[in-house]
Image: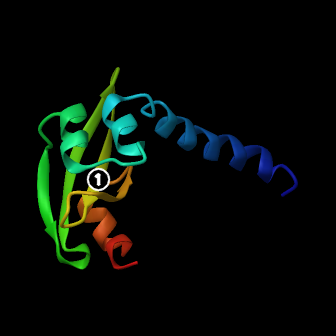
Amino acid sequence: MRYTPFIIVPLLSACSFSFMKFDNDPLVQATYATNATKSSVIAAGGKPDSEMNVPEINGTCINYTLKKDAETMPFYVAFDENGNRKHYGYISCQQARAKGVFSQ
């Protein structure tokens, strides 16, 4: 039992590093920008993989698949009715809805 932290910490760190691998992607950087809008995000990321309406925020959510080397990662960005960024993360719009992100 006393060695458990030595096993768990590296596993958790590996997950964190997967996300960090994509932090310099132009799409992610555009999403992180203070005044990110739907048009600025799409300008940086190109055409999204899919888009869905999100009644909970009176807006939309777009899905992208980030790619670097052989690794891929889902990434979503949700916008209100004015096109302002509301939510984003390294999951899909559908997963964000299932987790209740849009209801907060």
Closest to the observer: 37 or 89? Answer: 37
Q: Name the quadrant of the C terminus.
A: bottom left
What colour-coding does the image apply? rainbow
Closest to the observer: 86 or 90? Answer: 86
Q: Is residue 90 left or right of residue 6?
A: left
Q: Is residue 18 left or right of residue 31?
A: right
Instruction: Name which residue lies at 49% across and 36% down.
Output: 18
How many numbered dots are placed on residues in this image? Answer: 1
* Residue placed furthest toward the top: 69
Counting from the top left corner in percent of width and height, residue 72 is at 32, 34
Q: Can you tell which quarter of the image residue 40 is in?
A: top left
Instruction: Name which residue lies at 62% across and 47% down.
Output: 12
Residue identifier under label 1: 77
Please tell me whether residue 92 is drawn above or below residue 66 in the rendered image.
below
Instruction: Name which residue lies at 11% across and 38% down.
Output: 47
Counting from the top left corner in percent of width and height, residue 39 is at 18, 44
Counting from the top left corner in percent of width and height, residue 28 is at 37, 38
Q: Is residue 88 left or right of residue 23?
A: left
Counting from the top left corner in percent of width and height, residue 60 is at 17, 63
Q: Can you tell which quarter of the image residue 80 is in?
A: bottom left
Crowding at dot 1, Cα within 10 Å, few <14 / some 14-19 / many 20+, comes out as: many
Closest to the observer: 64 or 57? Answer: 57
Q: Is residue 7 left or right of residue 30?
A: right
Please tell me whether residue 98 is drawn above or below residue 90 in the rendered image.
below
* Residue placed furthest toward the right: 2
Q: Residue type at mark 1? A: Val
Q: Name the quadrant of the N terminus.
A: bottom right
SS of the residue under disc 1: strand
Please tell me whether residue 94 is drawn above or below residue 72 in the rendered image.
below
